[in-house]
Image: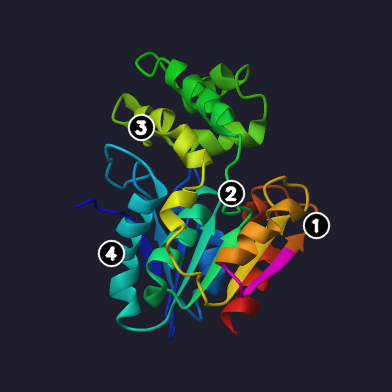
Amino acid sequence: MTSLHTLQYGEGSGSVVFLHGLFGQGRNWNTIGKALAADHRITLVDLPNHGRSDWTDRMDYVQMADIVATEVLAPLAATGPVALVGHSMGGKVAMMAALRHPELIERLVVADMAPVSYSTAREFTGYIEAMHALDLNTLASREDADAALVEAVPSASVRAFLLQNLRRDGVVWRWQPNLEILARDAARLSDWPADEVAGLAPYDGPVLWIAGAESAYITPEFDAAMTALFPRKRLVTIKGAGHWVHSEKPEIFTEALRRFLAG
């Protein structure tokens, strides 16, 4: 049994569960979770091979969806309605969970991700190679790690995001994610397992899609795939935001989410 690390807070009649993207962790949702905690029970999940959750011998969307459903969604659904929110990789996990376990999910929110295959595996493996290349045994500080990543990862915001995964245990630095498994399964994570969902019924609950206007992850060409599996979807596009729409425009994202959760 894979153990998932979660953070839980808030009170209310229903639960809202948040799933992060690749290289992320549950606490990436802290700001938005706390903004909703007065009215909802909030659960922030570290997905397998990320954060403080257990490592596994593979990563695929069916496996992750089933683990989340068993360990997190089922216990919460026993006491009230559950809304599931996922960004990027976590969005695909959330979609798969809704298709495979619709009885556990009262409504679904997907942030800047569609049920399609993307050609992003090489970008992801490039980040992993740069992280692997750091000599953690001689690393003196997080600032030194940032400087060492500049050539491979020019974006300061991306480096800051990746370096959230660098932890110091005493005098030893370590990466929290399972970089070997992420590198090996990067192509699978960029893909969408169409064969696995071919025999499943569309999810008939309400779905809110929140896209960043400056992101290429949600485009008109993906609308048919989204509608086929999630016919009750509604799309909101946030101006001035890219793929990390929830962290780039948190106030607007939170207000859209709050209205959707209120029905």
- Magenta residue span: 230-236
Q: Amino acid at mark 1?
A: Lys
Q: Which residue is mark 1?
A: 239
* Sequence-first tag of 2 and 4: 4
Q: CA distance from mark 2 to mark 4?
A: 25 Å
Q: Nearer the viewer, residue 185 or 19?
A: 185
Where residue 229 sits, quadrant-wise, is bottom right
Point out residue 225 in the picture as x, y percentages from the top left corner.
62, 58
Q: Amino acid at mark 2?
A: Val
Q: Which residue is mark 2?
A: 116
* Label 3 Cα neighbours within 10 Å, binned few <14 / some 14-19 / many ≥20: some
* Label 1 Cα neighbours within 10 Å, binned few <14 / some 14-19 / many ≥20: few
Residue drawn where x is 38% and y is 36% of the image: 177
Q: Amino acid at mark 3?
A: Ile
Q: Residue furthest right?
A: 239
- Given this view, does label 3 or label 2 mark the residue nearer the observer? 2
Q: CA distance from mark 1 to mark 3?
A: 35 Å
Tell me if I can see residue 155 in this picture.
Answer: yes
Q: CA distance from mark 1 to mark 2?
A: 23 Å
- Find residue 181 and name its label: 3
Q: CA distance from mark 4 to mark 1?
A: 36 Å
Q: Residue furthest left?
A: 1
Point out residue 123 in the picture as x, y percentages from the top left corner.
59, 29
Q: Amino acid at mark 4?
A: Thr
* Sequence-first tag of 1 and 2: 2
Q: Which residue is mark 4?
A: 70
Question: Does the stretch in magenta take in 7?
Answer: no
- Given this view, does label 1 or label 2 mark the residue nearer the observer? 2
